[in-house]
Amino acid sequence: MNDQDLKKAVRESYSRVAKNSQSCCSSGCCGSTKPESISKKIGYTDGQMEDVPAGSNLGLGCGNPIAYASLKEDETVLDLGSGAGFDCFLASKIVGPQGRVIGVDMTAEMISRAKANASQGGYSNVEFRLGEIEALPVEDSTVDAVISNCVINLVPDKKKAFQEAFRVLKPGGRMMVSDIVLLKALPEFVRQSIKAYVGCIAGALPKDRYLDAIKSAGFKDVRVVQESIFPLDCMTNDPTGKAILTSLDGAPEERKNVEDCISSVKVSGLKPN
């Protein structure tokens, strides 16, 4: 399957998430875990989850980049793969009315939902743009901080994604991403599954290659600031996380083999002055 086919699969899958969660999944009645339960496990506080418009948290992240991004008042922040706007709305509270937050997502339905959430919450300093991470609709050297939450693993050309993040950052700007990486090779049935790719797992890079992609884009002081094994239970709201869990039903050893391969990392990098 080529890159365009993969992108199409990802776009269609997350389009369904945007549509379906409007009606029921935010309450957990679709058989998925409540987004708040997942978000708490991966590092968000009750206060953060209560301080955003209802329906902006879809429980799709793998960490809390806001907790490590050191955002400041009046800064311009870019969120790669902004979804329904959860991290954008948290960032907007920090940068304040004179700051600016831009969310970019390639799924039109997610952008529509995020805009509705922004209107509902009165977020005048947040905007959402339709576009791909490998070709950001953002001008050169205009952003103080780039954040992203469990999205770059879905991008076929990760090197290009990091090059784009580097391009839009101001000199001295910084990037903080929370993402999925591999600690060892995945079982063959996962690697061969397009559903697993859409579900974040099979598209993930080995940890060393992921860090090398950031460094090759020009970032300096690249470091992992936090790392933990990422349990499959935190993927029950992911488009295909439940399918993977179902395929492993009754096979605890095989499930552990998959989980032992997956790590959630929070990685920072700086654009030199």
Image: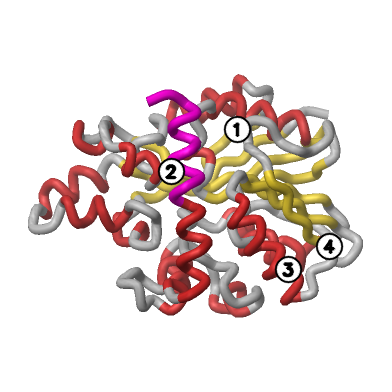
Closer to the N terminus: mark 3 or mark 2? 3
Residue of label 2 = 180
Badge 3 marks a residue whose secondary structure is helix
* Secondary structure category for the residue under label 4: loop
Q: Position of residue 136 (x, y in %)?
A: 71, 36
Q: Which residue is mark 3?
A: 118
> What's the amino acid at mark 2?
Ile
Q: Is 157 or 232 nearer to us in this picture? A: 157
Query: Real-space Cα distance between discs 1 and 2?
Result: 16 Å
Which mark sits nearer the N-terminus, 4 or 3?
Answer: 3
What's the amino acid at mark 3? Ala
* Residue on which disc 4 sits: 125
Element type at marker 1? Answer: strand
Which stretch did the figure color magenta? 1-13
**Residue 230 vertical position relative to residue 222 in the rendered view, above or below:** below
Dot in front, 3 or 1: 3
* Residue depicted at x 72% and y 40%: 174
Q: Is residue 89 left or right of residue 18?
A: right
Closer to us: 114 or 180? 114
On the image, the x and y values in percent for residue 65 come to 59, 53
Task: Give left or right: position of 164 versus 206.
Answer: right
How far apart are labels 3 and 2 at the CA level?
28 Å
Question: Residue 161 is drawn in which quadrant?
Answer: top right
Q: Which residue is at 59% across, 57% downward?
A: 110
The residue that label 1 is drawn on is: 222
Residue 55's disc number = none
The reply, left or right, for residue 189 in relation to residue 174 is: left
Q: Say which residue appears at 33% left-offset and 35% top-offset.
A: 183
